[in-house]
Image: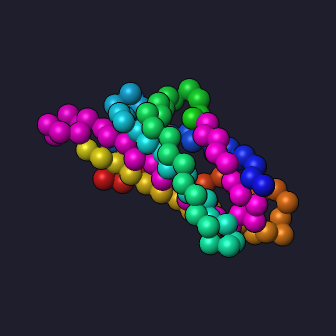
Amino acid sequence: MSSKSKVLLQPRLYLNDEPVPLTILKDTKVVVTSLSQMGISSSNTFDNIEFNHKSEAEIEFPVAAKLESITISVETKAKLMTKDEPVTLSSSHTISFNQHLCKIIQTNHFYLNF
């Protein structure tokens, strides 16, 4: 039996320690991959996610019982003034779960790299 989980993504984009508007991000894709203790993997892809600086992007996805880990991957394109073509930015983060805990609330930071 599967249940649902939510991930809140609150992006921030900086260049030389200065905030950059999130409107430069295009074709943003989030992939959430869950892995059960039995080694069964399931991926959910969310295309055309739009980030803004005022609120979090909420991603809801199904998870199987006996969850071992979730990997969240974000990929987007940004048009930089110094380049003609958009630059691809990506990042991923894995959260592992302890099965003896009933509920886990975890906050993590991960960064887009290029």
Q: Position of residue 17 (x, y in %)?
A: 39, 43
Viewer-closest of 4 and 56? 4
Q: Residue at x 58, y 63 (%)?
A: 41
Viewer-closest of 58 and 22? 58
Q: Residue furthest bottom?
A: 38
Q: Is residue 82 visible?
A: no
Q: Residue furthest left?
A: 84
From the viewer's perspective, is residue 10 above or below residue 44?
above
Q: Residue at x 82, y 56 (%)?
A: 103
The residue range painted magenta reads 58-86
Q: Position of residue 23 (x, y in %)?
A: 38, 27
Total numbered labels placed on residues in the image: 0
Viewer-closest of 26 and 19? 26
Q: Position of residue 66 (x, y in %)?
A: 75, 65
Image quadrant containing the N terminus: bottom right
Q: Residue at x 41, y 39 (%)?
A: 28
From the viewer's perspective, is residue 13 above or below residue 70?
above
Quadrant assignment, res 65: bottom right
Quadrant assignment, res 22: top left
Q: Taken as a whole, is the magenta stretch helix, strand or loop?
A: strand
From the viewer's perspective, is residue 9 above or below residue 92?
above
The answer to whether residue 8 is left or right of residue 49 is: right
Quadrant assignment, res 42: bottom right
The answer to whether residue 10 is left or right of residue 90 is: right
Q: Residue at x 50, y 45 (%)?
A: 45
